[in-house]
Image (cartoon, rainbow, N blue to C red):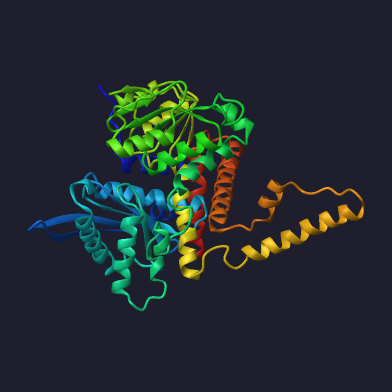
């Protein structure tokens, strides 16, 4: 008899239960953290193509231990209340882990964006935003959405404009949503933030030889074989940065219409261009193509990056996974049962709670930018350059006075004299966040005899911080 696979929401609860079993929380506080505070379901009509079409959407608020609450809005036909509530819970723990001052929320709309043209999608999005905003489920101080699966900066710009139309005197209206285009109040580095966060997470993992050894690996990222499942925004940027900047070799890319595989390594940018032109990976000339993408998920590799949907590694296929370590770029790609099977085999899993937190981290920076009404670096960049120039000029003057007559290299001077712009500051803040969060997990992972994996460690850190917030409020 086949083992019953829990639902996505059940998986989140199971992982929560494992962590709180190791904590000293009162039953009342434990339940308060576990449950979803509220879920709003909306059904609205939009006149399209000469007829009224009714759409169903959700916005769930899991925890208001800190406000505003934060979480993406996804567009997919599979969206349902249980999924949205599970994702909202993950957002609570994720925000706590990386110390962004938000509670957890999530939204979804049952729509396939491929079924509608751009103008129609704008009408649908604006009406959904209206239904949420009039109930303060979009608000800079209460609930701040962001892009998720099926949405992008395009939808965020529409939502921000709709909110502004409804709140014409709100000076902070731009902060009602993050992930906006740069010319609509966005921030440099937000589009690639989640993929960049995956890269920084792996870089930090490989700074600790003891942790690398636990995964049966050695050395650095250079030369490591990587398989990526899902070449959407997150998977594309993670694969691109790891291959181009860290020397990793992307040997497999899995998409809806099959998978590509090459022992010599794939050119991520060329594959992405092919997909944009042809709608999938099929027919790509410089690699082997497999109709069965799930089979490539089981190919031998050092690092597996599931970057698409939840529940792709289950109890049915977990024992066939050959990757030495898995980093969850998607939300919930490994079920609780599969997690146990992989852990027993010694596969190290860097959990979604941490691994894909780059998006909400840079969303936090964007929210702060919108509230401060000034881009990062604008006040201090040229002053930094002036101070660095003073130092370089003085060093060269002193060397001339002493008769050395040496001059700093042109390349060094160009890099040193350049003041940090917004993108550099965003990357610095994201890198620092990913390093600090990993070290907090690692301290629990290595410091407690009853914690065997990073996921449990992540939940312990996160739940502990949420509990501390509630206690500070008097609960």
Q: State the image quarter where residue 12 is shown.
A: top left
Residue 254 in view in this figure: yes
**Which of the pair 26/163 is nearer the observer?**
163
The relative height of residue 394 versus residue 234 in the rendered view (above or below) is below
Report the residue at 92% width, 52% height from top: 402
Does residue 101 appear anywhere in the picture?
Answer: no
On the image, the x and y values in percent for residue 410 come to 71, 48
Q: Which residue is at the front of the view, 97 or 22?
A: 97
Vertically, is 285 above or below 461? above
Q: Residue furthest right?
A: 402
- Residue positioned 51% across, 68% down in the render: 374
Q: Is residue 75 above or below residue 284?
A: below
Horizontal and vertical percent position of residue 52: 9, 59
Query: Which residue occupies the extreme bottom position in the image?
Result: 169
Q: Is residue 95 left or right of residue 281?
A: right
| In the image: residue 154, left or right of residue 236 | left
**Residue drawn at (34%, 59%), measured in percent from left and top?**
156
- Image label count: 0
Front one among 447 and 428 = 428
Q: Position of residue 55 (x, y in %)?
A: 17, 55
Q: As drawn, is 142 to the left or to the right of 39?
A: right
From the image, which quarter does the N terminus lie in? top left
Q: Nearer the viewer, residue 149 or 3?
A: 149
Residue at horizontal 23%, vertical 54%? 118
């Amino acid at each position: 008899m086949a083992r019953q696979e829990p639902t996505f929401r059940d998986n989140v609860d199971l992982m929560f239960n494992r962590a709180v079993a190791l904590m000293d929380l009162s039953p009342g506080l434990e339940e308060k953290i576990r449950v979803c505070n509220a879920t709003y379901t909306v059904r609205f009509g939009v006149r399209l193509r000469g007829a009224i079409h009714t759409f169903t959407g959700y916005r769930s608020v899991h925890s208001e231990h800190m406000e505003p609450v934060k979480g993406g809005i996804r567009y997919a036909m599979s969206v349902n209340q249980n999924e949205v509530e599970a994702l909202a819970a993950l957002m609570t723990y994720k925000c706590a882990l990386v110390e962004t001052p938000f509670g957890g929320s999530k939204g979804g709309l049952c729509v396939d964006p491929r079924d509608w043209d751009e103008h129609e999608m704008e009408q649908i999005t604006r009406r959904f935003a209206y239904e949420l905003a009039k109930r303060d489920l979009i608000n800079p101080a209460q609930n701040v959405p962001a892009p998720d699966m099926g949405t992008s900066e395009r939808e965020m710009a529409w939502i921000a404009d709709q909110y502004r139309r409804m709140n014409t005197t709100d000076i902070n209206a731009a902060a009602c949503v993050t992930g906006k285009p740069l010319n609509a109040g966005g921030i440099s580095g937000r589009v690639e933030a989640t993929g960049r966060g995956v890269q920084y997470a792996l870089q930090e993992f490989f700074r600790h030889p003891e942790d690398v050894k636990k995964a049966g690996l050695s050395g650095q990222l250079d030369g490591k074989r990587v398989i990526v499942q899902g070449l959407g925004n997150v998977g594309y940027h993670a694969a691109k940065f790891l291959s181009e900047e860290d020397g990793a070799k992307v040997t497999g890319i899995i998409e809806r219409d099959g998978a590509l595989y090459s022992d010599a390594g794939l050119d991520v940018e060329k594959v992405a261009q092919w997909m944009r032109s042809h709608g999938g990976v099929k027919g790509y000339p410089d690699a082997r193509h497999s109709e069965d993408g799930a089979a490539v998920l089981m190919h031998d590799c050092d690092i597996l990056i599931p970057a698409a949907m939840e529940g792709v590694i289950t109890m049915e296929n977990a024992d066939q996974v050959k990757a030495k370590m898995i980093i969850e770029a998607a939300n919930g790609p490994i079920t609780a049962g599969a997690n146990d099977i992989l852990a027993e085999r010694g596969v190290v899993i860097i959990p979604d709670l941490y691994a894909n937190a780059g998006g909400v981290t840079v969303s936090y920076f964007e929210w702060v930018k919108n509230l401060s009404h000034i881009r990062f670096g604008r006040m201090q960049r040229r002053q930094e350059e002036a101070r660095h120039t003073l130092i370089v000029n003085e060093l060269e003057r002193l060397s001339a006075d002493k008769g050395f007559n040496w001059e700093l290299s042109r390349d060094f001077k160009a890099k040193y004299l350049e003041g940090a712009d917004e993108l550099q500051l965003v990357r610095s803040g994201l890198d620092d966040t990913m390093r600090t969060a990993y070290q907090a997990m690692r301290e629990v992972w290595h410091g407690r005899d009853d914690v065997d994996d990073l996921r449990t460690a992540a939940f312990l850190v996160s739940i502990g911080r949420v509990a501390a917030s509630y206690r500070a409020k008097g609960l």
